[in-house]
Amino acid sequence: MQEVAVLGVGLHRFGKTGDGIVGTKSVTELCRHAVEMALKDAGVSWRQIEAVAAASSRFSGGKGWGLNGNDIVEDIGSTGIPVYNMSAGCAAGGNAFNVGYSMVAGGLYDMVLVVGGEVMPKGMIQTSGNEEVTDPEFLRQRCIGFPGPSFWATLARRRMHDYGTTEEQMAAVTVKARKCSVGNPFARFQKEVTLEEVLASPYVSNPLRLFEICPVSNGAAAAIICSKHKAREFTNKPVWVASSAVATMTFEDSLPRGLAGPAPSGPSLHTEAKAAVLKAFEHAGIGPKDMSFTELQDNTCYYELAFPEEWGLCQPGEAERLLAAGETTPTGRMPINPSGGFVSFGEATTAMGVFQIAELTWQLRGQSGARQVPGAKAGLAQTLGLGGNATAAILKR
Amino acid sequence: MEPCEFGGRGRIWSYSVANFPPPPPHKYDNPFKPYAIAVVDLDSGLRLVGQMVDPPAALSVGAAVDLVIDTLYHEQDKAFTTWKFKLV
């Protein structure tokens, strides 16, 4: 195994179809912008890229919109390089990073582009385009109607029961996230919101409100990763990949993901996310206490409370107190999503895992401006996708 | 593996409210009326997801429910039914 560095990163600011940010740009145009930015950041020319790991949203059972990595290569230049299209629902960006990392670490390539981008269909994400009665996801959506927000609301309601979490505390997560996004030039929302404004926004799925759920966005993200000896040619201060891990859910998982399953006796949590993060800690040889900050998949405020507890960043039931004490802000003891997170960016599904790599890289270089985590040495990134997919990566300087 | 029967009685593990119409392929009668979705642990050891017959405000975590058959939507003068839960 050879060490892997992140040499350059790039983003296209996130926005909504028709707005002044992304307008009517295609996914290829958004990706071109992100890739060119990453190449420039790395000081690398397109001809030096040896392979592409692309996050594809053409997920089985999904609607089939989204990125095909071959389009990016055709657009920027058909140099004949291999393109790997990875599909893992919303974890696809993290998956593509892991595959790119594994190929460089394994010595197959020295310089790889990881890219993700989306032009999202409007409204709640449709998870089943397949009208087939043997498809449990189709039955779940036809017979119950259980899109993402309802799934997240079920988990949030259970947390309220278990820990006495209030709607005000969940709204405070959004207030903190949006405060981080101020001055982040890539966030779709860059304005603060007040607790009153969050609580005045309508329920999408009670107890979760509009401002507490990430919308769908258009956007793109790219990262150039390379081997240690290659990195030395371009910089004397690379950001290192300490580990990259992928996991899927296990038998004891008890979340209501399908129609029915055995009632569990243990705690109900995302086993795939926990497994990926714990593997990332193990492979990196550093633990939760060594993380200067974390970028986690906050499709909704619930995850910002639950995930740090599930991964050992803090104690179970402690997240609300840490939030209230300001410990999850960039200058706190346990900074969570200094970028502003999904709640400030909106979700451009396949871009997200790569967007997190960009934020981690800027933070570790000390380039994050107002949202900078002081003295950041190591950062954790995590994604979660339909089908029980999760990824985690740790970068360090 | 052998077939086994499961009773319809259980308790609500958690629940949410569909305040907006879910996207296709969900079908519902217009005008859309918000409804609750419960995740229920049946006494037989199965965790099952389904719509609630009762209004959201009547629900609480831990409440006892029964499985029932109820109408989901109408199409071409026909009622399409599904499984739902009802508070005991």
Image (spheres, rainbow, N blue to C red):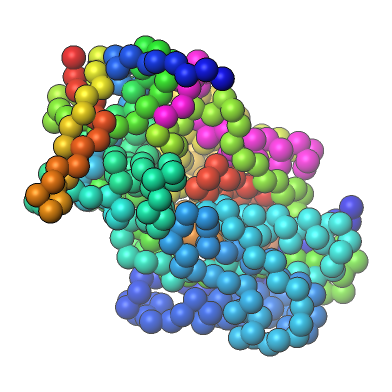
The residue at 75%/66% (across/down) is A225
Q: Position of residue A267 (x, y in %)?
A: 50, 21
- Tell me if residue A8 comes above or below residue A350 in the rendering: below
Residue A258 in picture, x, y percent from top left = 43, 36
Q: How many marks?
A: 0
Q: Nearer the viewer, residue A5 or A148?
A: A148
Q: State left or right for residue B19 relative to residue A255.
A: left
Q: Nearer the viewer, residue A369 or A176?
A: A176
* Percent x, y of residue A144: 29, 40
Q: Is residue A377 visible?
A: no
Magenta span of residues: A260-285
Determine whether A390 is above or below A102 in the image. Answer: above
Left or right: A179 as drawn, with respect to A29:
left
In the image, is A365 to the left or to the right of A235? Answer: left
Identity of the residue furthest to the top in this view: B43
Q: Nearer the viewer, residue B79 or B22?
A: B79
User: What residue is drawn where x is 77% and y is 78%?
Assistant: A81
Q: Residue at the spot x=13%, y=46% of the render?
A: B78
Question: Is residue A4 rendered to the left or right of residue A24?
Answer: right
Residue at figure coordinates x 47%, y 54% from the top left: A61
Q: Is residue A299 magenta?
A: no
Q: Is residue A139 visible?
A: yes
**Percent coordinates x, y for residue A188 in the rendering:** 40, 66
Residue A110 vs A162, above or below: the answer is below
